[in-house]
Amino acid sequence: MNHPHQNIWWTWSESLRHLLYGGFVFFMPFTQALTFNIGFPLKFSELFLIMLGGLYIILHRRVRLPGMLTFLLSMLFIAITISLVVNLSWDYPYLLRGYATRFGYTGDSLAKYVYFIIALLSLFISVDIFLTDRRGYVSIWVYGSMAAAVYAWYLTAFSALRLPVYLLPGMENPPQTIDGTIIRCGTFLEGNIMGLYLVLSAAMAFYIKKVRIGIFLLATVITTFSTLSILACFLFILIYLQHVLFKRKYMIWALGGLIVLGISFYFFSDSPLYKKYVTDKLFASTDTRGPVAASAVSKIDRLYTFRSAYAAGWNNPIWGVGMSNFSRHYDRYLPPVSDSSMHVFMQKKDAKVIPNNIYVEVFTEAGIPAFLLYLALLASLLYYARTDRSRSLTAGLFCMLLCFLAYPSFIMIYLWSFMALPVADYITSKSKECPSS
């Protein structure tokens, strides 16, 4: 027989657990806005998550995950941990690059490792919570994304009209802009991060059949001016609506939509924005033997940084160069640049350089074993998402894989929290098939 105090404690702890998780997902998009600088931006969502982690430890609460996922996460954690330990004491036979750091080179490496653990924690707790009430907490996530999206439209519209804007506490001043004018980052540090968050949030809105909110969130991606995120919106629509678009009774609507998109694209292709953020990004020449055109700087920068990161990883194939350490090896593996001004630009003096590609980031920093495990983890998520009849989770995952080609880091918490949804959906569907288990 349960003691009355035990029942009260259980009820109180359950209420606290759900309250903290609701706050966590609602404030998740506010990673720059509504933060407080204490050497790093202190976020409400992270505070709620850490409190949740402590509560789970106090309650000795276990989280059930599919066996395959448990194995992959365990092996990935071990591989990254070994990579960290090895590189903390490894002496390289060349001079490592210096740059400004937040906590020192070792401190930055340890800080990123801690964030990786927090990201894993968000996955475990999100799976557990989604198994309890998926629709309720996905709704809270969506409402938080709506608040961030409305604010993003405000920033973009007012800055485009040269009107004064109110920046929420914690935001950099000035925030990331297009041509120094139009604010594109929303509540995040960068437009690319905001763009993928909106796409995944739209997937969650479609998952709970809040279609109009999903459409609004996809439309808000425009405010980020993120090329891959905008492409991801079209990819999402194609995957999500494939079972509708190609049915005869809907073909007229599909053709009408394509005509509208074609006309819009025709007029947009003549604009300076299209030339700068589509044509130049994708098709500008990367030849540095002669003077480099200003329009090609961005593409050359991304390409040469990619080559440097790939070379660093290939020359350190087992354990990589360590968490957050690529910038120290950047100069060593940077391909030669003939154009003098471009050469100076690519040196990035006193700046921390990142691969800006998640696949290369994991390969370079943690080595081939961790890279293969991470790919297997992403593949397993697509396997779990097959139980989602709405197709929105599968579409969201494919969009995520696309955006990872130009994304700053794999430890962003909202990515791991989103990964929990197809896992929870899979566990629930299997429980219905085998109720005795």
Image (cartoon, rainbow, N blue to C red):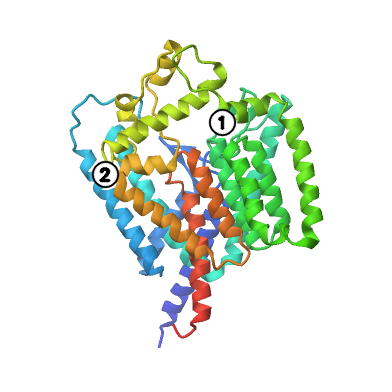
Would residue 76 be found to the left or right of residue 28 on screen? left
- Please state, as top left, top right, bottom left or bottom right, where the N terminus lies in the image: bottom left
Q: Residue at x 58, y 62 (%)?
A: 137
Q: Residue at x 30, y 38 (%)?
A: 314
The image quarter in which residue 391 lies: bottom right
Q: Residue at x 81, y 54 (%)?
A: 252
Would residue 315 be found to the left or right of residue 402 on screen? left
Mark toward the viewer: 2 or 1: 1
Callout 1 secondary element = helix
Q: Which residue is mark 1?
A: 282
Would residue 360 be found to the left or right of residue 220 on screen? left
Would residue 413 be found to the left or right of residue 103 on screen? right
Q: Which amino acid does the dot numbered 2 rest on?
A: Leu
- How far across and down, in percent of the image, does residue 363 sit? 35, 43
- How far across and down, in percent of the image, does residue 39 sit? 40, 35
- How far across and down, in percent of the image, does residue 227 sit? 60, 36
Instruction: In this rendered view, identify the residue nearer to me: 310 or 188.
Output: 310
Callout 2 secondary element = helix
Q: Which residue is mark 2?
A: 84
Can residue 175 be seen in this snapshot?
no
Q: Which amino acid does the dot numbered 1 rest on?
A: Leu
> Compared to 434, does 250 lie above or below?
above
- Please state, as top left, top right, bottom left or bottom right, where the C terminus lies in the image: bottom left
